[in-house]
Amino acid sequence: MSEFPARKFVRLPSPFPMRHGGVLPEVEMAYEIGGRLSPARDNALLIVTGLSPSAHARSSAEDPTPGWWEEMVGPGLAIDTERFFVICVNSLGSCWGSTGPASIDPRMGRRYRMTFPVLAIEDIATAAHDLVRALGIERLRAIVGPSLGGMTSLAYAILFPHEIGALVTISAATRATPFAIAIRSVQREAIRSDPEWKNGEYEQGAEPRAGLRLARKLGLITYRSAREWRERFRRERVEVRDGKAGVFGVEFEIEAYLEAHAERFSQSFDANCYLYLSRCMDLFDVAEHGGSVETGLGKIRAERTLVIGVEHDFLFPIDQQEEIASTLRRLGRDVRFVPLPSIQGHDSFLVDIDRFAPVVADFLAGI
C-alpha cells in the first residue's frame, strides 16, 4: 500500500551559497515520500509547498494525522501514489524540519535568527533540487507547486530546465503585485512591532505571538474572497461573548474564526521563519533570469505545463496565471491554462478539491 512515512531528512552538500549573498555551512532538508520509485527512477513527482505547510501532505501509518493535501495526494487520487513516487519537501527557511532562521548555526552554537542570509525563492528551489539529487533521482516526471510553491516550481524549471518533464503551477505568479507586497509588508510590521520580537532574539516560550496572530489574521483575510466571507458568515453573532473583553471583544462569527485560526498558527509557526518566507515572495522576479519575464520563462523546457488560476483570488490575481500561460504558449510550449470559479480565493487549492482534483488528475494522466 502506498503511503507517506514519517518525516525524513537529507543533509545537502556543504556549503550552500545563497542567491543574495551569504553561505549556509550546513543544510538539512525535511521531506516525506509516498509510493515506490520505479527501477528506472523515472516516476518521481515533487510537491513544493506554500508558505506555511510542512512536508506532511498525506497521512500514513506512522503519522495518521491528516496531511495538508490529504484529499489530493494518495492511492488513486489526483496525485496518485500508486503511479508516482511522490516527494513533498519542506521549504528551506521554514520551521518544519528544514534549515531556517530557527535552526542552530553550527558556527555559533545558537539559532540563526536574524543572521540567517536573505532567502530567495531560487534558494528554496535549489535546495529542493539538491534533495532530489541526493535521493538518486536525476529527472522529475513532474513538479507541482501552489502559491509560494508555484513560484518555487517556476524557479526550479528555470534553473534546472532539463530535469523536469511536466510543470504544474497553481495560483502562482512571475512576480508579486504591489498589493501583495503591501499586505505582506504590514504582516511583517505586525510581527516586528510586537515587543516580544526583540529584533528577532526571542527565546522559545517567549515568542511574539501577538504580532504573529495579527499577521496570520491579515493573511487569512486575503487568502479567501469577500464573496465567501459573505456567504459563509454573513453577520452571524457568536453564541457566547466574553464579558470581560468589553465592546471590542469578539462579537461576530467571522472574528471568532480569525481568532481561532490565528491562535493555533501562533503556537506552532516560528515568527522569524514567517518573516523570511514572506519576504522571499516579494523578492522573486522571473525577469531577473534574462532581463524580461518572457526571457525568464523561455528557459523552461518542460514538455507539458498546467497553469491553474482562481477567478476570485485577489492575492495572486488570475491575470498573473494568464501571463504565465500566454507567455509560454507564445514561446511554443505545450500549455494548458485552467481558470476555476472557486469562491474560496487563494486558498481554493486546499479546500475546493472537487474542482482542483479532476484538473490535476487529467493533466497527470497524460504524462
Image: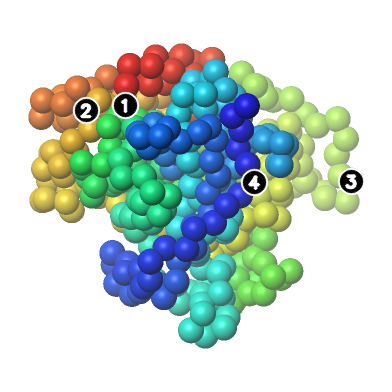
On screen, residue 185 versus residue 287, left or right, reads right
Residue depicted at 67% across the width and 24% down the height: 233
Q: Please, what secondary structure does the residue beneath circle 2 have?
A: loop
- Quadrant for residue 314, please give it: top left
- Quadrant for residue 92, please give it: bottom left
**Rounded to the nearest whole Å, what is the CA distance between mark 1 and mark 3?**
49 Å
**Rounded to the nearest whole Å, what is the CA distance between mark 4 and mark 2?**
32 Å
Residue depicted at 71% across the width and 36% down the height: 61
Q: Nearer the viewer, mark 4 or mark 3?
A: 4
Are the residues tagged 1 and 3 within 8 Å (C-beta)? no
What's the amino acid at mark 4? Answer: Ala
- Which quadrant would the C terminus be assigned to in this image? top left
> For this rendering, which residue is in front, 335 or 197?
335
Residue depicted at 61% across the width and 67% down the height: 194
Residue depicted at 48% across the width and 47% down the height: 89
**Location of residue 208 in the rendering, given as x and y in whole percent from the top left corner:** 65, 65
Mark 3 or mark 2, earlier in chain: 3
Which residue in the protein does label 4 denote?
6
Q: Please, what secondary structure does the residue beneath circle 4 have?
A: loop
Mark 1 or mark 4, earlier in chain: 4
